Amino acid sequence: MIDTLWEWLIVAGAVLAVVVGLGVAFLRPGRGAPERQLPTPPKPEPSGDEGGGGVLAPPRPTPTPTPTVPSTPTAPPVEEDVFVEDVLDTPVLDRPDTAVGRLQRLRARLARSNTALGKGLLNLLTRGGLDETVWEEVEDTLISADLGIEASTELVEALRTQVKVAGTRDEASVRGWLRQDLLRLVDPRMDRAIASSRIGDRPAVVLVVGVNGTGKTTTVGKLARVLVSEDKDVLLGAADTFRAAAADQLETWGARVGVPTVRSARDGADPAAVAFDAVKAGIENEVDVVLLDTAGRLHNKTNLMDELGKIKRVVEKQSPIDEVLLVLDATTGQNGLRQAEVFAQVVGITGIVLTKLDGTAKGGIVVAVQRKLGVPVKLVGLGEGPDDLAPFDPEQFVDAIVA
């Protein structure tokens, strides 16, 4: 029995060995059943936002490599006391036209606008039969050109005498007589210079006045350009505190040619105080001339004219006013003469600026206003351009009429 049991154990051990061997062979990789692998989760693309907003950005394209170019060695930059901001903020200033160019345009434009006056007179004077009717037509033509009744009558009488004495009416002779008599009425002997140079230790002070709508602020800006073209150091005073845009407008005119403007920080400030501060700044900065712009006002408004008188008195507490320029619209003709009289009484006019003279054939207003006030026309406005303000030249003016 022992032998039988022993044999059974040997057989059982052999069977067990075979079974274990088969199991190991079955579980080894590459043999039998394939090895199991866990699924790998997808790898997210970088979003470019380290904060992580939860939204993935689209994949970035692969950059194309750029060929390397060997750089040329340069000298180290020179250190200078120049700031980039200063270079970028430096304004490009206008270069105003000279007086010569302005006078050329004056003659050309006056010749176009006053052709009717000159041709009309020549046609009347050179045709046959200079009877009383013709002479009345000549006088009417002069009056319609705003020469004024007194000056028109005087000119007609002078022409009648010359025609009678010479006994001729050819165009060349009549043109010469007409030029001579008109030039005498315009009076080239009047001083038409603008006060624009320092007087002792102070600048010249110019006060600019006028009624509404004559182009006063624009005239001040253009006058600044005239003086800058003559190498004058100019300062502007924005004493028109009534009209909101007046100070801005004047400041813009000045900035274009590098001229500073003294203005109030608020609208409706006392114009006399602004004018005072402007003159004070002009004295401290040793400029050549201070131009003071004032608000337009009707000559029949007593309170506004009193305000203008106050401006003049306040300024004169620290400096005399050397020039008071009255800006007149040439198209208003004889209506402007009453305005001129009232302004002359309040502030004492020293010179006239005639604007819009290029748009009218009524050039006779030059003679009329000079006779009325006894002061010269010093500047004339020729148009809307920035340099369309010119010194008044009597001979150029007359030649433009009779040319």
Image (cartoon, rainbow, N blue to C red):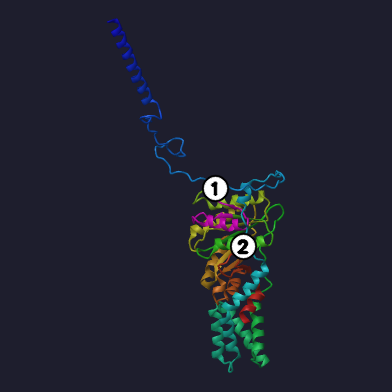
Spot the residue most to the top: 2
| In the depicted structure, whether residue 194 falls above or below residue 132 | above
| In the depicted structure, whether residue 396 falls above or below residue 4 | below
Q: Badges 1 and 2: C-beta atoms under 8 Å apart?
A: no
| In the depicted structure, whether residue 299 falls above or below residue 85 | below
Q: Nearer the viewer, mark 1 or mark 2?
A: 1
Q: Give the camera-side residue of 4 and 355.
A: 4
Look at the image and tell me whether residue 348 can be seen: no
Q: Residues within 10 Å of mark 2 (few under 14, many from 20)?
A: many
Q: Give the camera-side residue of 165 and 195.
A: 195
Label 1 and label 2: CA atoms lie apart by 63 Å
Which comes sooner in the sequence, label 1 or label 2? 1
Q: Residue at x 61, y 71 (%)?
A: 370
Q: Quadrant of residue 175?
A: bottom right
Q: Residue at x 53, y 55 (%)?
A: 248
**In the image, which disc is placed on residue 64?**
1
**In the image, which disc is placed on residue 309?**
none
Q: Quadrant of residue 353?
A: bottom right
The amino acid marked with disc number 1 is Thr
Q: Give the camera-side residue of 89 and 371.
A: 89
Q: Residues within 10 Å of mark 1 (few under 14, many from 20)?
A: few
Q: Residue at x 66, y 63 (%)?
A: 194
Look at the image and tell me whether residue 210 can be seen: yes
Residue picked out by circle 2: 223
The amino acid marked with disc number 2 is Leu
| In the depicted structure, whether residue 381 falls above or below residue 248 | below
Question: Magenta span covers which residues?
Answer: 237-263
